[in-house]
Image (cartoon, rainbow, N blue to C red):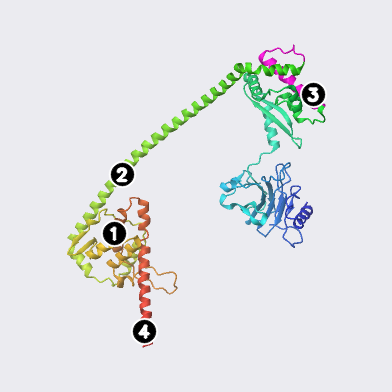
Amino acid sequence: MTTNMAERSRTAETGSDIGSEDIIAGNVSKYTVLPAGYCGQPKKGHLTFDACFESGNLGRVDHITEFEYDLFIRPDTCNPRFRVWFNFTVENVKESQRVIFNVVNFSKTKSLYRDGMAPMVKSTSRPKWQRIPPKNVYYYRCPDHRKNYVMSFAFCFDREDDVYQFAYCYPYTYTRLQHYLDNLQRRNMDYFCRELLGLSVQKRQLDLLTITSPEDKTDLENSVMQKKIKIPKLSLNHVEEAGEVTDYGEEDVELRHSKRQDGRKQSEGTHKSIEAVVARLEKQNGISLSSTSSPEEAFMETSEGMNNMDDAVVPRVLYEELLRSYQQQQEEMRHIQQELERTRRQLVQQAKKLKEYGALVSEMKELRDLNRRLQDVLLLRLGPAIELEKVKPESIEPEPEVQKTFSEEANTSTYYPAPVPVMDKYILENGKVHLGSGIWVDEEKWHQLQVTQGDSKYTKNLAVMIWGTDVLKNRSVTGVATKKKKDAVPKPPLSPHKLSIVRECLYDRIAQETVDETEIAQRLSKVNKYICEKIMDINKSCKNEERRESAKYNLQ
């Protein structure tokens, strides 16, 4: 089979592009795909494909690279343009071998693969079907394959001894269906009836299943017959010219499946169909038509009397259908009312929770406001200690233990200050604004800062107001040396309590714009980033100034 497959592949390559898919005659059988130019026995990793089993479908495999294969599926038996189903096995794999399979000759333009569906896979050690992750599946139109739709999926084999099977979706074979129907038929259930409707082109059974209660079976047959009998109001000449009556009963099934060889057989089929219609009408309505001279005359008399029978037969059938439809609509309406009631209760519960949440939020804001006031009162009482802190220069290096503590506190990104919802609560005194922790800024600069647009610009300007550019250019936010330079020396970290003041001011600003805690936390987490950018901008401007002075000195 390997040689035949290779010959078929070579024939496909040498043939025209239009007929390259039409020459796929059968499924591959234990076909091992070898790289081009390879001679010798197959090794582990040379994949072996097989589709010679029930519901299997794979007609051709092309080796593209070591990791990529093009797969061609066979068309349907009676429709060579319809190519959708595939089902095949792969063995002789290597552990951790990664491959890409391209099913290149799909005939459908719209597929569920475009909406998240994925092929099925199982192996001998894991016999339960599973779907390949959708992120590894791609469905697209490929210009390299006559603009056909291609479904590509990536897969990694994890066990060498397993045989892997891939399928379009869950396979359901003809044998499994027949076993299931045989089991149902052996139970001799009154409400289940199985009949042979006919045979397929490949001589497989086409079963007709009827599921209903025994007492309603006769009424069901009569109802179906009434719906399907269509008696044209034409003369017998027109009926004979048409060759057949539009009757879908049991007697006409044999005529539809038989081959009519001449006009005599067609005429006999017409007579049989008319006789069948007459017999059914006599049985259903008790009308005796035996006095007519011929079946044609009986048929005409019956068709003329159908208008009088409509009031007795058709309204009853329509009434039953309308009654069933009305009952179904009532049931659906009851379900919808139950759903609406359940949804209403859920909405009431959610409204109560939202009300409680609003009360908690307002209470929390009041507590934070009270906490800030208490802090300001304590800081005002500790005046001498604050004055000493103001006199202490910023450039003094902290002790090692204090520096370590500052670094750890500065690295914490989960610190969120207590907000002050109203900006007017900052203390104003002698043209200065007290931000907390003994930090005072100029009142005019503070008011200019409030109209600044954007969190980044606001944070950078506030950092310059608190530390100044001379301090910022010699400090870092965390006190840790950068990893971009090998010989980088760590700079002293910024004071954690001043960093907390920056976060508090930014929090007060953001709290006036939104109440979403997630958004507030996300925007506050960027404070360190903004200050780092400002420090880098200051250092960059200093270096540019040094370069300009150096160039001026060289010119002199």
Residue on which disc 4 sits: 552
Which numbered disc, 4 or 2, marks the residue that appears first in the sequence? 2
CB of mark 4 within 8 Å of CB of mark 1? no
Q: Secondary structure at mark 2?
A: helix
What is the x, y in percent for residue 121? 63, 47
Residue on which disc 1 sits: 505
Would you say 327 lies left or right of 378 here?
right
- Kind of residue at badge 1: Cys
Residue on which disc 2 sits: 358
Which numbered disc, 4 or 3, marks the residue that appears first in the sequence? 3
- Kind of residue at badge 2: Gly
In this rendering, the answer to whether 222 lies above or below 113 is above
Mark 2 or 3: the one toward you: 3
- Kind of residue at badge 3: Glu
Which numbered disc, 4 or 1, marks the residue that appears first in the sequence? 1
- Residue 268 is tagged as 3
